Image (cartoon, rainbow, N blue to C red):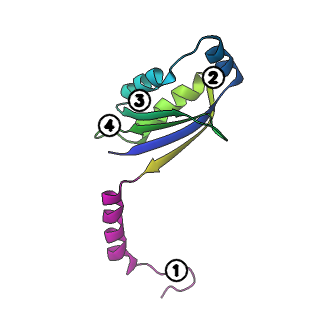
Amino acid sequence: MTIYITQGRYTDQALAGMINKAEDRSVAVAALAKAAGGKLLDYYVTFGEYDFLVVIEGGRGKNETDTMAALLAAAASGGVTDLKTTIAVRPKDAMKAMRGAKRIVKNFSPAGQAG
């Protein structure tokens, strides 16, 4: 299953609303992830460039389109902005990719060195 790590910022209006009435946004994010066939693994409020970090596991048999739909829905709500999503690969899957690269690399030439 694919792991998606998303960082983003709350809009001024969202921050004002959360200050006015404290709210655990992980509940809403978990529901959004579930609607897209995924599962919320972690949700953090963060310091620095971004206001939050979300870790979601994509559903089995799901694809990037489902995750993109959830991100579009979140962005369209007007409460978040500057979303940045990274796909994370577990070590066992990275090792599979390394073995695949070893098999494939013999068929690849760097630019300017073909032939």
Residue 114 colored magenta?
yes
Secondary structure of the residue carrying numbered label 1? loop
Disc with the residue nearer the chain's start (2 vs 4): 4
- Residue type at the position of mark 4: Gly
Disc with the residue nearer the chain's start (3 vs 1): 3
Between disc 2 and disc 1, the foreground one is 2
Disc with the residue nearer the chain's start (2 vs 1): 2
- Magenta segment boundaries in residue numbering: 89-115
Q: Residues within 10 Å of mark 4 (few under 14, many from 20)?
A: some
Please give the name of the residue rendered at 33% of the width and 65% of the height, measured from the top-left corner: 95
Q: Is residue 53 depicted above or below 33 in this figure?
A: below
The reply to whether discs 2 and 4 touch (Cβ–Cβ < 8 Å) is no
Please give the name of the residue rendered at 63% of the width and 22% of the height, measured from the top-left corner: 78
Q: In this figure, which residue is indicated by the disc labeled 4?
A: 59
Decide which of 11, 42 is in the foreground and name it. 42
* Label 2, label 3: how far apart the Cα atoms are: 18 Å
* Label 3, label 1: how far apart the Cα atoms are: 41 Å
Residue at the left extreme of this rendering:
60
Secondary structure of the residue carrying numbered label 4? loop
Secondary structure of the residue carrying numbered label 2? loop
Q: In this figure, which residue is indicated by the disc labeled 3?
A: 33
- Residue type at the position of mark 1: Pro
* Label 3, label 4: how far apart the Cα atoms are: 9 Å
Of the 4 image quadrants, the one containing the N terminus is: top left
Q: From the viewer's perspective, is 61 left or right of 57?
A: left
Decide which of 17, 105 is in the foreground and name it. 17
Task: Give me the disc on residue 67.
Answer: none
Q: In this figure, which residue is indicated by the disc labeled 2?
A: 78
Disc with the residue nearer the chain's start (4 vs 1): 4
Q: Is residue 81 depicted above or below 79 in this figure?
A: below
- Residue type at the position of mark 3: Ala
Q: In this figure, which residue is indicated by the disc labeled 1?
A: 110
